[in-house]
Image (cartoon, grey):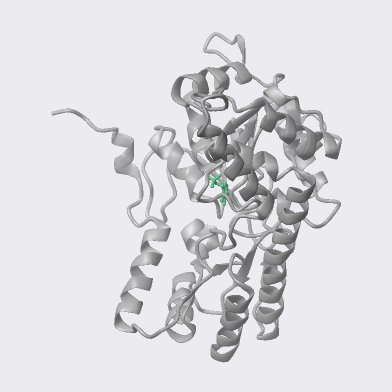
Amino acid sequence: MFQINHNYQKLQAGYLFPEIARRVNAFSEANPDAAIIRLGIGDVTEPLTPAVLQAMHAAVDEMAQRGTFKGYGPEQGYGFLREAIAEHDFRARGVQIAADEIFVSDGSKCDTGNILDIFGKENRIAITDPVYPVYVDTNVMAGNTGPADQSGRYAGLIYLEANEQNGFVPDLPTEKADIIYLCYPNNPTGTVASREVLQKWVDYARENDSLILFDAAYEAFISDPEIPHSIFEIDGAREVAIEFRSFSKSVGFTGIRCAFTVVPKELQGATADGKKVSVHQLWNRRQSTKFNGASYVVQKGAAAAYSEQGRAEISERIAFYMNNARLLCEGLSRVGIHVFGGENAPYVWLRTPAGTTSWDFFDRLLTAAHVVGTPGSGFGAAGEGYFRLSAFNSLANVEEALRRIEAVL
Ligand SMILES: *Cc1c(COP(=O)(O)O)cnc(C)c1O
């Protein structure tokens, strides 16, 4: 019989979000009148802003005319969008990234998984704990790990613990890591990494010939002017880092789908016989072969987010979500809950009350307050005893959720 990819057999069954859905469905079937408020999955709730919407309507109309109809676009993205990204996301912050170092795609989840196509199986991979589960599972699928142990940790991966003591920014690995995943502002902890911390990581990568895969999906939520938005704001990062960005959370494109990956031309990896190869060329080859570009209509919408009107609308939208985050932090603190994050990221990470596991707290909030959050343990063993609430919801729902939480805690 034909064989499957045996690595899939190593994947831990109870993936976090299906298990949440299972418990929520069971509860709402038993309690059909309960008005459940979902602050669980990190999905936006607010509709597209006018500038983005108008640009997408106009792009659809272009598709309706022979003279302006578009077929396949460039696999790397249209020049108009790559230029707008280089200008507004990088040059405006004093960072030199060329438009052709930007690869537009249909999502950062896909990019962070797909990037493994161009790297060898010999690499030692380091991830933080807790972590965005995609980094782990894509490495399992790619055969970069052994089986999982009782605690759900995979053999062969280096786990870097993020905890209260280190401010949820892990210490450098004590063993040599070839590829390191960092995500700041962080999902799930909502915490950020300072310039000094990021410099330490870049220096480590340079000393060890390692690669940093930097996920900046939440950079638009940074309000503190001292916090870098890009790994490329750090000296020396161009030789050791790839950055992932997404329009999902900032522009509200979780359903529309558009993101990009920055691969500097200086970045080089090694062949088996020690020769150096351009990673930019490898990624270009991979994308040209396996990807046919993001939709023109979608790229027009993304580009409109960089217009003057677009930027004003998006910053208003982000301020709206971040006001929710502030209310969550304040409200939870009032009832004696210890909170982290929520200042430069749309996630509030809270310490569950003493003696309460992450899943206990999940069940308690669901059954007593009809509020859904995400158990910290679902993001890794080090997330046990913590819980994530998302700021993506209406103001009315956030206020109502807080009233209920305050009443039951
Ligand atoms: C939401 C999110 C992304 C964005 O993924 P898309 O596929 O672009 O929607 C990337 N990384 C993290 C950590 C996220 O939470």
| 266 to 214, vertically: above or below | above
Q: Is residue 251 left or right of residue 313?
A: left
Placement of 169 over or under 140, stated as above or below: below
**Residue 81 lies in what quarter of the image?**
top right
x and y percent of residue 323 in the render? 72, 70
- Percent coordinates x, y for residue 262 in the rendering: 66, 31
Determine whether 11 is above or below 104 in the image. Answer: below
Q: Is residue 228 left or right of residue 68?
A: right
Q: Residue furthest left?
A: 1
> For this rendering, which residue is in front, 253 or 14?
253
Foreground of the two, 378 or 151: 378
The answer to whether residue 205 of the structure is visible from this angle is yes
Q: How many marks?
A: 0
Judge left or right: residue 310 versus residue 135. right
User: Residue 355, relative to residue 68: is it above or below?
Assistant: below
Depth check: give the residue in front, 248 or 362: 248
Viewer-nearest residue: 126 or 3: 3
| Residue 91 at x, y percent in the picture | 83, 34
- At 54% from the left and 8% from the top, the residue drawn is 273
Q: Residue furthest bottom?
A: 407
The answer, for residue 185, to whether it is visible in the render is no
Query: Residue 352, image x and y in percent?
Result: 56, 75
Point out the image quarter for the N terminus. Answer: top left
- Residue at 50 percent of width and 34 percent of height: 64
The residue drawn where x is 56% and y is 24% is 67
Residue at (72, 78) in percent of width and height: 330
Screen quadrant of the C terminus = bottom right
